[in-house]
Image: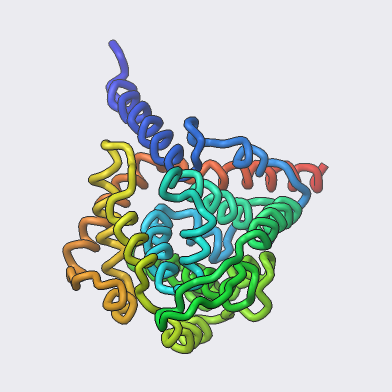
Amino acid sequence: MPDLRSLVSAPRRALSAWVGAGLRGIVSGDSTGTPQWVLDMKDGDDAGYFGPGSAVWAVHGDLATLVGGIRALLVQALHPAAIAGVDQHSTYRADPLARLAGTTRWLTVTTFGSRAAADREAARVRGMHRKVRGTYDAGDGEQRPYRADEERLLLWVHAAFTDSFLATHEAFAGGIPGGADAYVGEWATAAELVGATAPPRSRADLDAYMADVAGNLAATEVTRRTLEFLRRPPLPVAARAGYAVLLAGAVSTLRPEHRELLGLPDGGVRVPRAATGALLTTLRTLLSDGPPAAGAARRRLERLEGATSA
């Protein structure tokens, strides 16, 4: 007689594999869900800039980053110069998953890769930034120059990511080793790797930066185009309902001043957060093995520990 547990677990494993491949395929741009650069994270000679037990591994290894990524894009769109660079130099409207895959690669390699891998990834990003320059509408009818590698834009993009991943992790995932200050302080390394010189190093620093930059934010025509795109991205039909839940969850965590600038209605907190939390709980159950990048990184660490003890 077949084992009952096997009969129950086999469909669950198949569903987990299907969901995992689909979800990771969307964010990585690879149909298998595990591109070669993820597999390569088993290579290297050190634990990387962070490592197991770090605040960065805890935050970036959780599925709440799906919500954080959406929130970060909403917030980034409020800086006229930053969003002009995306609008003028990115193919996100024609090939949105390509830009998502590039951002995912940078975040994942910097988090879980060896130091050498993270340094190479940072060099790739710096090279891309050097090519991104132009002019933007400052909102007063004047065209002003921008460069993606200038300090103010590097800090803005970094702060938008940090603020968003922190806010969504606290809303949908829970505790962080060392708390918010540990996460902000550790992740400052990522900003330095791509060229920023004075990133926030504590939650208080991050809040102060967000307050200081508030006067430079505005909802331009490019912001509105980006917002419309984020509301209805060309995702596979099967992913659209889930994305709508994640978007609502992201909006529920926005700072009030950012939500107002974006012209987004106050949908409250309780209902969107409950729905988003339920979706993420289901996904965590189905994808209980965690991100493939973290698994590859742990294999690297096990190899290094084995070499040390031999």
Q: Is residue 213 above or below residue 3?
A: below
**Across the whole image, how many numbered discs are drawn on residues?**
0
x and y percentages locating residue 104 in the rendered image: 52, 51
- Residue drawn at x 44%, y 55% as measured from the top left: 62
> In which quarter of the view is residue 251 placed?
bottom left
x and y percentages locating residue 9 in the rendered image: 33, 28
- Residue drawn at x 40%, y 31% as measured from the top left: 17
x and y percentages locating residue 2 in the rendered image: 30, 14
- Residue drawn at x 49%, y 39% as measured from the top left: 29
Indicate how the structure is coloured in the image: rainbow
Would residue 127 be found to the left or right of residue 144 on screen? right
For the N terminus, the image quarter is top left
> In which quarter of the view is residue 186 placed?
bottom right
Work out whether residue 47 can be spotted.
Answer: no
x and y percentages locating residue 245 in the rendered image: 25, 54
- Residue drawn at x 48%, y 74% as measured from the top left: 179
For the C terminus, the image quarter is top right
Would residue 117 be found to the left or right of residue 225 on screen? right
Work out whether residue 301 can be spotted.
Answer: yes
Can you name the residue that lies furthest to the top here? 1
Q: Is residue 193 above or below residue 92?
A: below
Q: Is residue 258 above or below residue 111?
A: below
> In which quarter of the view is residue 64 placed?
bottom left
**Residue toward you, 231 or 114:** 231
Q: Is residue 204 above or below residue 176?
A: below
Would residue 83 be found to the left or right of residue 301 on screen? left
**Residue toward you, 276 or 193:** 193
